[in-house]
Amino acid sequence: MSGDLATMDQEQHSPVRPGRTWFSKFRRNYFGTPISSAISILLIALVVATGPAVLRWLVLDATFTGTAAACRENGGPCWAFIGAKLNLILFGAYPDEQLWRPVLFLSTVAAIGVYGYMFPRRQTKVLLAWLLSLLLGMALMRGGFLGLAPVDNARWGGLPVTIIVTIAGLAGAFPLGVLLMLGSASKNIAIQIPCKAYIDVVRGIPAITLVFMTFAIIPLLTPQEFIADKLLRASTGLMLLTAAYFAEALRGALEALPKGQDEAGKSLGFRYWKRQRLIILPQVIGNSLQPIANISIAFVKNTSLLIIIGLFDLLGAARSSLFDGDWQGFYRELYLFVGAIYLVICLFMDAYVTSMERERKERISR
């Protein structure tokens, strides 16, 4: 009897083998059902069949240094083209001697993103940091103070423009989306109908049309001395579009919220805006994190539309690098490189929101 008790005690206190735990999770996630097993086997077969050829084309047959003539002679992918045009792809026509300014801005944004991912509880401070990074980026890119040489925004381009438009557009779209959501759920017809009409109409307009309309119509409605520059007008167009999608995503979460939440706030004597701020909106936003992430990712990809109004975002600046006659024809390498950058940004945004969602669930479970 004592031997059995000793054995049980040893089993209870013996550490769990991480390899066995990892393998069980892997088997459960990818081979837990016949359908998931079949899909996993097909994907593995696809990787085995195409992987060696893709690896050979990407790496073994590639030219990493040299001239365009050497790339054409070798016949494989020309990653030397990316190295030769890297500054133009990432920063557009920004002066080479001032590139430390956009680099500093991008480094700041990356640091804030990593901090927000690692500490999801501190999103209020992180949100303020995002807004300050936007002001810092605009100031650094523009210059004209503290001895910084002024740089016209016509020379801005590449990744900094994509990041600036994304932060500015999302910072404006989300509050507007919240107001539209509250307006569409209002019992006041004078507020409800315009908000619903805005959401339905704007969501039915293609993004490229709305960006062009915003860019072309704002100068007609604004006095000449108050006309905003291209960057602000482009951010406004994408902001108006994204706000409608935010409003619809939030409205779904609002309708799923039990009505007793609002009634409990009324019983405590809270007025409308206090109920929204303390009770309703935290739950609505928390339950909408994944749709918010999806809309934000779509916003990042929609910044590629800025080229139609003469702004060279990441994709526009990359395409301009093909105008060099010596390097023409290497578009596959270019689009793979730019696509990888967009993929990293979008994957990080998804992981960022997932960390917030995980922290929220842990807080509720306590």
Image (tube, rainbow, N blue to C red):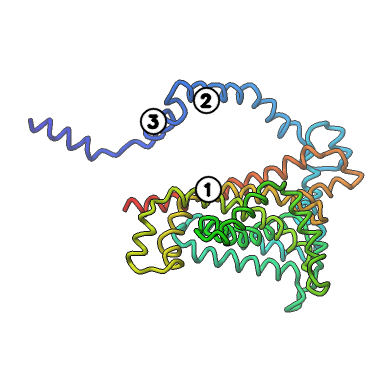
| Front residue (pair 146, 218) | 218
Secondary structure, mark 2, is helix
Measured along the vertical axis of the image, is residue 234 above or below residue 252?
A: below
- The numbered dot on residue 40 is 2
Q: Residues within 10 Å of mark 3 (few under 14, many from 20)?
A: few
| Residue designated by label 3 | 24
Q: Is residue 56 left or right of residue 13?
A: right
Secondary structure, mark 1, is helix
Measured along the vertical axis of the image, is residue 6 above or below residue 276?
A: above
| Residue designated by label 1 | 351
Q: Amino acid at mark 1?
A: Ala
Between the C-alphas of marks 3 and 2, the distance is 15 Å
| Front residue (pair 13, 132) | 132
- Rendering coords of residue 146 (x, y %): 73, 79
Q: Amino acid at mark 3?
A: Ser
In the image, farthest residue toward the right: 325
Residue at the image point whose x is 52% and y is 25% from the top: 40
- Rendering coords of residue 103 (x, y %): 69, 61
Between the C-alphas of marks 1 and 2, the distance is 23 Å
Measured along the vertical axis of the image, is residue 53 above or below residue 111?
A: above
Q: Residues within 10 Å of mark 1 (few under 14, many from 20)?
A: some
Secondary structure, mark 3, is helix
Between the C-alphas of marks 3 and 1, the distance is 23 Å
Residue at the image point whose x is 74% and y is 52% from the top: 210
Residue at the image point whose x is 72% and y is 46% from the top: 206
Measured along the vertical axis of the image, is residue 42 above or below residue 268?
A: above
Front disc: 3 or 1: 1
In the image, farthest residue toward the front: 189
Quarter that holds the N terminus: top left
Residue at the image point whose x is 73% and y is 64% from the top: 232
- The numbered dot on residue 305 is none
